[in-house]
Image (tube, helix red, strand yellow):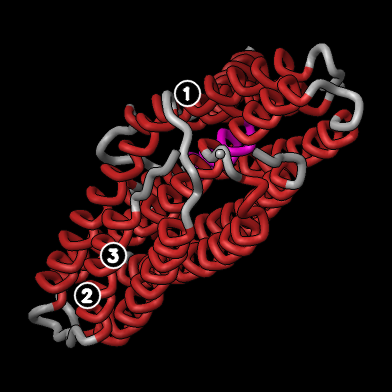
Amino acid sequence: MKNSIIQKSTAYLSLMLLSVFSNTAVAVSPLANDLQNLLSEAQATDTQLATISLTDSNMCSELLSAHQSVDALINNIESINANLSSAISIDDESLQALDDLSAVLVNMANSSTALSLDLGLLNSTTDMFAISNGLTAMLRLADDIGTMADRILEMSDKILVMADNIGLMADRIIITQQIQSDNLSLTQASILTTQQNSIALVSQTNTSTYEVDFNSQTLTGNILAADISTTLLSTFTMARKWADIATDTDALMAQVKATHETIIVASESNTVTIDADSYTALVDMSIMLNSIGIATQGLALATEGLSSFTKDATLSDSMGSILQMSADIGVMADRILEMADLILAMADNIGLTADQIIATQQLQSTNYAATLASVEATQEIAISIIAVNSL
């Protein structure tokens, strides 16, 4: 009798433990759930792009439908980004979803390149008016995919800035950031090819320039890069100096975003002639931002050297500024690239300046990749400092 009672008790306890473990196994954080839903939607859109077969009668409708799907994805990403809470605990499921999302983006970008080639094959047999509309839709789609890649990277950076368990997940976070950066570079390379394929089909002529805004922001950014490069840190001034630099970076980001918004509004109703000065100024902006990224990485290394002698509170404030600043640099890099794409989509004299545009877009892509590499290296330094000092 006693043995029977013990056996029943043991069986009951086993069932209880199994229930607890089962519930634990299926527990998924709200962030991981949101990212998984986003991934499912992205995979569906990826399938949609991969199965499009362009003809002279459906090119505009198919590309418009693809644009709407990608635009909906961007809105969902921005919604998740806006609803992120002030403190986030990162889990493996969320990081895996971010990895998978960036991989899907590479597929989408490759699909856009294939579609641009299909559009080129239709050029000789299709009315030029239809081809022109198709090209506009093609450039918009490529820009949308690039914007989505940017927003996913921004969301990843924001999650990193807000995370409260970096020390525990440091290695996994670094791997995810590397995957994000590599896949984003592949995405941008495919988008660049898509644009080049589209540009090769166009020959057509209003004038507008954003050179003054671009040059003003480049000057401000170059001064900031010089200030960062000459900043001397100590264990007593570290937090204040990082906070000052982060504030100046945030102010520059606000200017870049304001110009970006102006171009977005113009792109909805206007066309422009691409002028050499504006495109040269855009390249100068991307070079400037790369300089800020390199200077920030150097100052982060100096901070790492002082970390073992610095108070935890000072170090914590400094790391917050570093991570926020690196995220802001990433946002500016995204906006500069998007402005180049928007101006390209608005232009009605692409055929006249095709060589210059291709050269400029290649420079933009190179500078963008270099800036992302600096941002990634700075984040890795900050994560390493946090991980060491949280033990």
Closer to the chain start, of discs 2 and 1, is 1
Q: Is residue 79 above or below residue 185?
A: above
Question: Which dot marks residue 322?
Answer: 3
Near mark 3 (Cα within 10 A), the count class, few <14, some 14-19 or many ≥20, is many
Q: Position of residue 100 (x, y in %)?
A: 66, 40
Q: Nearer the viewer, mark 1 or mark 3?
A: 1
Determine which residue is flagged by label 2. 223
Determine contact: label 3, label 2, CB under 8 Å: no
Closer to the chain start, of discs 3 and 2, is 2
What is the tally of numbered marks visible in this picture? 3
Q: Position of residue 304 (x, y in %)?
A: 32, 80
Q: Which residues are magenta?
A: 141-152
Determine which residue is flagged by label 1. 76
Per the image, label 2 sits on a secondary structure element best described as helix
Say which amino acid is labelled 1: Asn
Query: What whole-number distance in Å separates the C-alpha atoms at marks 1 and 3?
Result: 28 Å
Q: Position of residue 118 (x, y in %)?
A: 86, 33
Which residue occupies 18% across, 80% down?
310
Work out which quarter of the rendered image holds the N terminus and state it: top right
Magenta segment's dominant SS is helix
